[in-house]
Amino acid sequence: MNTINKLVAAALMTLAAGLSQAARAEQPAPPKARNVVLVHGAYADGSSWSDVIPLLQKAGLHVTSVQNPLTSFADDVDATKRILALQDGPTVLVGHSYAGMVISETGNDPKVSSLVYIAARAPDAGEDYPALAAKFPATPASKGIVHQGGFAQLSEDAFIHNFAGDLPRGKAEALYAVQGRISDTLFASKTTQAAWHDKPSFYAVSKNDETTSPDLERFLAKRMNATTVELDSSHVSLISHPREIADLILQAAGYPATH
């Protein structure tokens, strides 16, 4: 990352902090929710929430994990909308990684009471997210993307060491085996809405992330005025730190922590 980009990133962080302070008084408290909808990111599937789901269910919440096809942004948005339509009351909408785009696009659904972003993308409406991300430090995982037949996946080395670097190797290998291959066009998509402008938002920063820059995550969290936690985690904190992620979701739902 060159000096100019470092200065730009620092300026963006300062601007986000100022916007966060200005908006803090306007952030409404989320109503108590009865449902949670979990949306997985790229190179994953709905089972990535398997360690978080029981903790939320134990607290009495109704939980559903979306299965994104990852064939296009529009397809993933439609998959999430179908699940939201099944909910019967206030719902916390949670997105990991790329799925931050999906929950930003769908989060203005009147059933959605709050939004939770886990090491997630959170572009503004119409924003060029790749251009924004380029202003922050590049991460090793981006060098391990393998393209074939119009789709992409992470190489085994990048997945195990850069995507899921704090998981036991056997667990990381199992997740690599079921990773969701993404359309080559997926990351070039733009949102038309940014629900975090209007809904109470929460963000979990992964301090040891080698897939998304932690500084970019901090910028996004500050810009949206999110209630933020920072975890000593790789990109997959929902797997390596499920209790902390569950606690953040419970906070967004108006429930006490699990411990």
Image (cartoon, grey):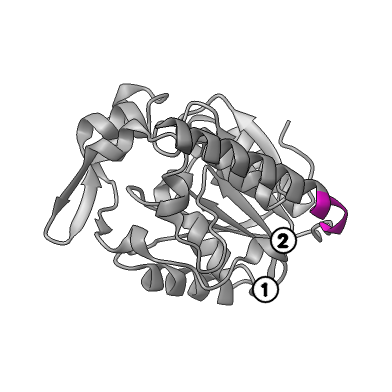
Q: Residue furthest right?
A: 25
State how far apart marks 2 and 1 are (Cα). Answer: 8 Å
Q: Is residue 135 magenta?
A: no
Task: Give the residue at mark 2.
Answer: 34
Instruction: Identify the residue shown where x is 61% and y is 40%.
Output: 11
What residue would you read off at disc 1? 88
Residue segment shown in magenta: 22-27
Q: Decide: few, some or many residues near mark 1? Use Cα within 10 Å; few <14, some 14-19, many ≥20.
A: few
The residue positioned 55% from the left and 68% from the top of the image is: 125
Q: Secondary structure at mark 1?
A: loop
User: Is 49 situated above or below 80?
Assistant: above
Q: Mark 2 or mark 1: which comes first in sequence?
A: 2
Horizontal relation, residue 179 to residue 8: left or right: left
Q: Find the residue positioned furthest to the front.
A: 4
Q: The disc labelled 1 sits on which kind of residue?
A: Asp
Q: Amino acid at mark 2?
A: Arg
Residue 25, magenta (yes or no):
yes
**Circle 2 sits in a helix, a strand or a loop, which is it?**
loop
Tell me what residue is drawn at x 45 percent, y 60 percent.
128
Considering the whole magenta stretch, tell me its main secondary structure: helix
Label pair 2/1, CB-CB below 8 angstroms: yes
Instruction: Tell me if 168 is positioned left or right of 207 in this view.
Output: left
Q: Nearer the viewer, residue 117 or 22?
A: 22
Q: In the depicted view, which residue is nearer to us: 84 or 59?
A: 84
Q: Quadrant of the N terminus?
A: top left
Q: Is residue 91 visible?
A: no
Task: Give the percent coordinates (x, y) of residue 247.
Answer: 68, 39
Query: Is 253 placed left or right of 181 in the picture?
Result: right
- Locate residue 120, reporting x and y percent: 51, 48
